[in-house]
């Protein structure tokens, strides 16, 4: 089978054997995959990654000995795969692989294998181009599962990248006053069309003045993609408020620890979410993700697709197998 291989900043097409299933696994034929900022970070050297990336995908089940009723079904998957017995949330199993990120070949390939328990069937009414957002939308929705978000809270999302947009749209389901701050009028307009309040800046340095002028927020979600974003978020949150950190960067961040301690601010890390919840939101039409799509490419044009995905301000780039 054909696959994409990342190593040392290079992108290569390679020929690999079709995955051989272990007990409890399913063989998936990939239909559509999305390029995520995490994939871009892996290409830059995050985790010292070498392998087949790709973790946002829709696929068809080709083999599944343990759950034969899934064969032929369209599915998406939780990307966290426990190794051996585990207790509790599989997303935090002490020993796990992560599809397309940690010791598990990903979806930028014709086939991949996934634990059958990780699979979620996509409803007929949800097209591929929406279902491929299930994993990042679940990450956006995760904030509302970690924090008790009420309608009277002052909520800000900092960063209008793909994850920032999805997080703002997700929080809008729980709070009508969500404010999304970013640098791209066209991307902010996607959220504004669905009821999210927005504010556009030209340069991150403007945030310092805004933080001094504006009333503080109860909850600030940092989704800038920058190692500097966490300190901007700390500037906007009220004493005893909460900052939710979404950015994963290959560069380290330095935190203003004195402000954190003196103002008794809580910082919550937030990663993957409930795929089933995200699919339900998509099926019910509660969030429209169509405006987040930049372009769709054939798999043979992957390098061109990835170049576009890396361009400044790009929205979601999809790859069709």
Image (cartoon, helix red, strand yellow):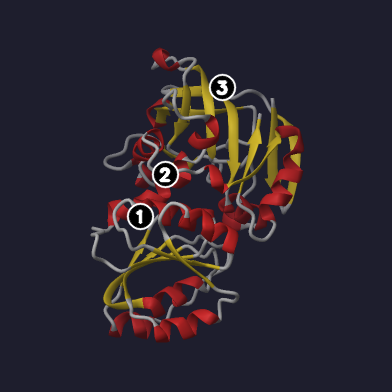
Residue situated in front as seen by the camera: 94 or 183: 183
Q: Quadrant of residue 202?
A: bottom right
Question: Residue 133, position in %: x, y?
Answer: 49, 41
Residue under numbered circle 2 = 287
Residue drawn 51% across the image and 65% down it:
224
Residue situated in front as seen by the camera: 191 or 205: 191
Above-or-below relation of 9 to 22: below
Q: CA distance from mark 1 to mark 2?
A: 10 Å
Question: Residue 145, position in %: x, y?
Answer: 29, 51
Residue under numbered circle 1 = 172
Residue situated in front as seen by the camera: 295 or 239: 295
Residue drawn 56% across the image and 22% down it:
20
Tag 2: Cα neighbours inside 10 Å, few (<14), some, or many (≥20)? some
> Taking 272 as reference, is 21 left or right?
right
Disc number lying in front (3 or 2)? 2
Label 1 or label 2, whichever comes before in sequence order: 1
Circle 1 SS class: helix
Are dots 3 and 2 in contact, CB under 8 Å?
Answer: no
Residue under numbered circle 3 = 20
Question: Residue 144, position in %: x, y?
Answer: 30, 53
């Amino acid at each position: 089978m054909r696959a994409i291989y990342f190593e040392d900043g290079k992108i290569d097409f390679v020929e690999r054997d079709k995955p051989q299933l272990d007990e409890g696994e399913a063989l998936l034929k990939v239909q559509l995959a999305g390029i995520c900022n995490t994939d871009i970070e892996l290409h830059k050297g995050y985790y010292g990654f070498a392998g087949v990336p790709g973790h946002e995908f829709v696929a068809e089940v080709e083999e599944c000995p343990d759950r034969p009723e899934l064969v032929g079904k369209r599915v998406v998957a939780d990307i966290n795969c426990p190794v051996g017995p585990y207790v509790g949330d599989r997303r935090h199993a002490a020993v796990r692989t992560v599809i397309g990120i940690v010791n598990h070949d990903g979806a930028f390939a014709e086939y991949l294998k996934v634990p059958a328990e990780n699979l979620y069937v996509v409803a007929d009414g949800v097209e591929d181009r929406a279902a491929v957002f299930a994993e990042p939308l679940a990450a956006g929705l995760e904030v509302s599962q970690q924090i008790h978000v009420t309608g009277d809270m002052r909520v800000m999302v900092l960063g209008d990248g793909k994850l920032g947009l999805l997080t703002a749209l997700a929080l809008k389901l729980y709070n009508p006053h969500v404010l999304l701050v970013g640098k791209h009028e066209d991307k902010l307009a996607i959220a504004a069309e669905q009821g999210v309040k927005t504010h556009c800046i030209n340069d991150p340095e403007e945030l310092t003045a805004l933080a001094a002028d504006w009333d503080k927020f109860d909850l600030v979600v940092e989704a800038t993609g920058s190692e500097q974003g966490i300190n901007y978020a700390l500037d906007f949150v009220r004493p005893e408020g909460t900052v939710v950190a979404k950015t994963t960067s290959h560069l380290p961040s330095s935190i203003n620890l004195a402000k954190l301690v003196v103002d008794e601010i809580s910082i919550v890390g937030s990663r993957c979410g409930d795929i089933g919840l995200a699919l339900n939101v998509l099926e019910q039409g509660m969030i429209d993700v169509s405006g987040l799509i930049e372009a769709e490419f054939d798999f043979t044009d992957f390098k061109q697709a990835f170049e576009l995905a890396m361009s400044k301000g790009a929205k979601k780039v999809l790859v069709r197998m």
